[in-house]
Amino acid sequence: MELGELLDDLTRPYAVEATDDGDRLVAMRLADNWGVGMRLHRRGTHRQWNIREITLRMTDTDASISGYDVRELPLGALISEARRIATKNAGAASEPRTNLAGILKANDGRFGSGDEALAALALEYVSMVEAGVRTPSKSLVERFGGSAGSWTNRVALARRSGFLTAVGRGEAGGALTEKARRVLGISTPDA
């Protein structure tokens, strides 16, 4: 199926199709007379998507789209929503063996520095960043206590230990590595 076909057949708020090469086609209905479709290509893990194509459609065949209409679209929010839908559709093939909350509970609130703790932190961190959290260390403090500096150092340790991919200095982000997925027992979907 092509992106145009998915938009033409859109009757629900959104629809998702997987292509033979692993791309996701996401079509979303905007108001009553708009549709936007995106072709997303997986990069890194099942949670990261590059945008390859964006298509806008008016469902009213007598209407047209102006440059002003396109400039008024909240493209950033639409891209984020398409990525969320693609990720939800890709779904994790399995649940992690443990999570950060479970590790902290089992260790009476202490983080430790073992591979399982670092991998669980990497998963929690990636999930926060992908959900749009702009200050993940502060969010970790709110959820689990401690200080933002300690969580930042732990994330850096997880990255140096090979559980998160590299990013530019001072940037939030990165992807869960194969090493982290192996430690947590997470299989890679669609792989």
Image (cartoon, rainbow, N blue to C red):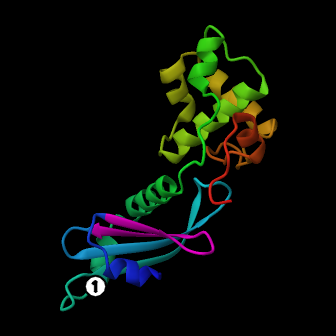
Q: Amino acid at mark 1?
A: Ser
Quadrant placement of the C terminus: bottom right
Magenta segment boundaries in residue numbering? 14-29
Residue at point 57%, 61% (across, down): 49
The x and y percentages for residue 150 are: 66, 21
Residue 65 image point, x, y percent: 27, 85
Residue nearest the viewer, comparing 134 with 128: 128
Extreme-top residue of the structure? 108
Residue 11 in the image: above or below residue 133: below
Q: Secondary structure at mark 1?
A: loop
Packing grade of label 1 (10 A; few <14, some 14-19, many >=20) is few
Res 102 quadrant in image: top right
Which image quadrant for residue 60?
bottom left
Q: State whether the magenta stretch is mostly helix, strand or loop.
A: strand
For this view, does 84 lie left or right of residue 65? right
Front one among 168 and 99: 99
171 vs 68, left or right, is: right
Give the image location of residue 72, x and y in percent. 29, 70
Residue holding disc 1: 66
Q: How many marks?
A: 1
Instruction: Tell which residue pokes out farthest to the bottom in this image.
Output: 62
Whether residue 125 sits left or right of residue 81 in the image: it is right
- Location of residue 115 in the rendering, given as x and y in whole percent from the top left corner: 78, 28
Residue, far right: 161
**As drawn, 95 above or below 54:** above
Residue at the image point whose x is 62% and y is 46% from the top: 173
Determine if the magenta segment contains residue 129. no
**In the rendered image of this protein, does residue 49 appear above or below residue 19?**
above
Residue pushed farthest front?
94
Residue 55's image quarter?
Answer: bottom left
